[in-house]
Amino acid sequence: MTRSFILGGARSGKSSYAEQLAAQSGKEVVYIATGQAYDAEMQQRIEHHQQRRPQQWQLVEQPIALAQAIQQWCAPERIVLVDCLTLWLSNLLFAERVDYPEVGLIEMPPLFIEQRGLFLDSLASLNGDLIIVSNEVGLGVVPFGAVSRCYVDEAGRLNQEVAKRCENVVLVTAGLPLVLKGSAA
């Protein structure tokens, strides 16, 4: 079974590219959405993604237990598309409502450590094709505040670990895919 990792910046075309790959597979598509609408702007982003997706795709909303959802839905006759890994990472970082300091080291919450480990472990034993979408957040300005810097660092570390475990890795910039590893999926 094939694991493909699609990276890109905000509005780079990474999700559209991943959706094209899923549609071209000819398989049943299960779309695992990790985003949560905590405000109107995020609700608009979610609605934009929903309108773009074919009606026949099955939607699974899973903001926390991503490994469990992937294991449940991956099967030889379908392709699972996860969008997006960095939203999932922020869900884990803030799920326990920790009040992070503005300066100093950030200690990762137990849920973050547990779910991150389960997710990475789950990639080794898939029973179907998987496409994972993630933001490349490390190319811009390092944000102010300890928790923001911690998030950027953790996203970079997670992206590296996922890329190691995937056969195909593609960076999308300005809507154009650049194959970093394997094939264009």
Image: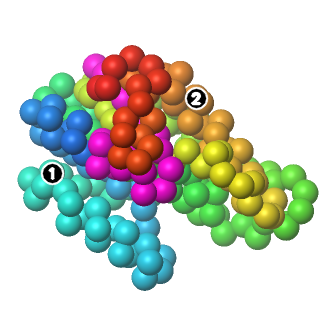
Q: Is residue 16 magenta?
A: yes
Residue 180 against residue 11 in the figure, above or below: above
Q: Position of residue 68 (x, y in %)?
A: 40, 42
- Measured Cα–Cα span from mark 1 to mark 2: 28 Å
In this view of the protein, which residue sits in the foreground, 8 or 51?
A: 8
What residue lies at 64% left-to-right and 57% top-to-bottom? Answer: 93
What residue lies at 47% left-to-right and 24% top-to-bottom? Answer: 180
In this view of the protein, which residue sits in the foreground, 169 or 74?
A: 169
Residue type at numbered disc 2: Glu
Residue 14 against residue 99 in the figure, above or below: above
Q: Position of residue 76 (x, y in %)?
A: 18, 25
Residue underneath mark 2: 161
**123 sits to left or right of 61:** right
Residue type at numbered disc 1: Trp
* Stretch in magenta: 1-18
Task: Identify the mark nearer the N-term, 1 or 2.
Answer: 1
**161 sits to left or right of 25:** right
**129 sits to left or right of 57:** right
In this view of the protein, which residue sits in the foreground, 45 or 12?
A: 12
- Mark 2, secondary structure of its residue: helix
The quarter of the picture where residue 55 lies is: bottom left
